[in-house]
Amino acid sequence: MLASVALYEVQGLTKSFGDLAVLRGVDLQVERGELVTIMGDSGSGKSLLFKLMLGLREPDAGRLIFDGKDMTGAPESEWLTVRRRIGIAFQEPALFDSMSVFDNIAYGIREQSLLPEDAIPRRVSETLAAVGLPGIEEMAPASLSGGMQKRVGIARAIAMRPEMVIYDEPTEGLDPINVTRVNRLMLALRERFAVTTVVATHNMRSAFETSDRLILLHEGQAVLTGTPKDFRESSDPRLADFVRASEMRLPRPSEAPPSPS
Ligand SMILES: Nc1ncnc2c1ncn2[C@@H]1O[C@H](COP(=O)(O)OP(=O)(O)OP(=O)(O)O)[C@@H](O)[C@H]1O
Ligand SMILES: [Mg+2]
């Protein structure tokens, strides 16, 4: 029975700030093991949606159902359990500058008392290796490049070995080589840790290359969902608006993927 339940289900999610109705009844499902990308204009509420899904903000209305359990209005203690099972790489890496890379990655493990202190170094080194940054434990976040900081943010999100990872604009501000690197990393981590993956991005090319399924957020609702192929073939005007607004075009199936270099 339970195996057929979506890992995360959002129903009728609504959130306003004063007169600004950002989310106006969002319905979406995340299935186990899939990589789903949420696309939408800047300010459409992607980051807000993620914060609501983690219990970091209170919705005005709607239901948040994680692994079959209705979390709507749940106490903080229950949300802490959810946040152990869902890692997030925030849009801003938000690393603690006063702490080493090691302590940044260990932070969530310690906060959740997931491992004894003497087991943490091994977990941190394995996780840094998984994001392609072995041995940088003692470095200060401020001394890392933007792309490295993004990957440390990803390491922090996966260090607890969550069942689901949310990546909020993981390639924003990166050069093409690092965009490719981060996209491959998300796919590799999904394989290695069998982690359900939710991404928000403006990068249409990345979304089309990495995703099993795409969701378009438009005027406060999830208006369109489908595979990259469905989206390519769609003539929905809301998708056309989004594509125009992002001043990009949908990659055609015949187009070669970017060179790996
Ligand atoms: N705490 C808050 N107080 C007031 N307004 C907020 C708050 N959080 C978000 N908003 C508003 O909600 C809207 C959605 O913001 P959000 O950051 O979720 O957008 P986004 O889709 O992630 O955009 P981007 O693509 O630029 O990251 C914005 O208009 C923002 O100003
Ligand atoms: Mg955002």
Image (cartoon, rainbow, N blue to C red):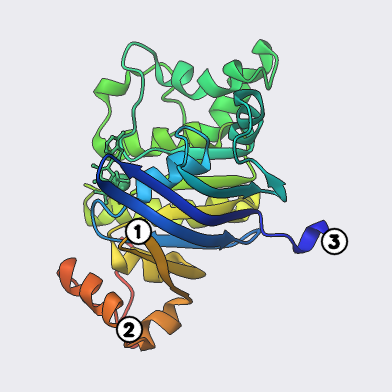
Label 1 sits on residue = 220
Picture coordinates of residue 24, whole percent (x, y): 39, 56
Whichever of labels 3 and 1 marks the residue nearer the N terminus, that label is 3
Near mark 3 (Cα within 10 A), the count class, few <14, some 14-19 or many ≥20, is few
Q: Nearer the viewer, residue 141 or 19?
A: 19
Whichever of labels 2 and 3 marks the residue nearer the N terminus, that label is 3
132 to 252, vertically: above or below: above
- The circle drawn on residue 1 is 3
Label 2 sits on residue = 236
Q: Nearer the viewer, residue 151 or 112?
A: 112
Q: Nearer the viewer, residue 45 or 91?
A: 45
Question: Who's the residue at 25% across and 47% down the image?
Answer: 20
Q: Amino acid at mark 3?
A: Met
Looking at the image, in which quadrant does ligand 1 appear? top left
- In the picture, measured across the screen, residue 169 lies left or right of residue 30, that is left
Distance of mark 2 from mark 1, alpha carbons?
Answer: 17 Å
Q: Amino acid at mark 2?
A: Asp
Residue at the extreme right of the image, as rendered: 1
Picture coordinates of residue 31, whole percent (x, y): 63, 61
- In the picture, measured across the screen, residue 73 lies left or right of residue 251, that is right
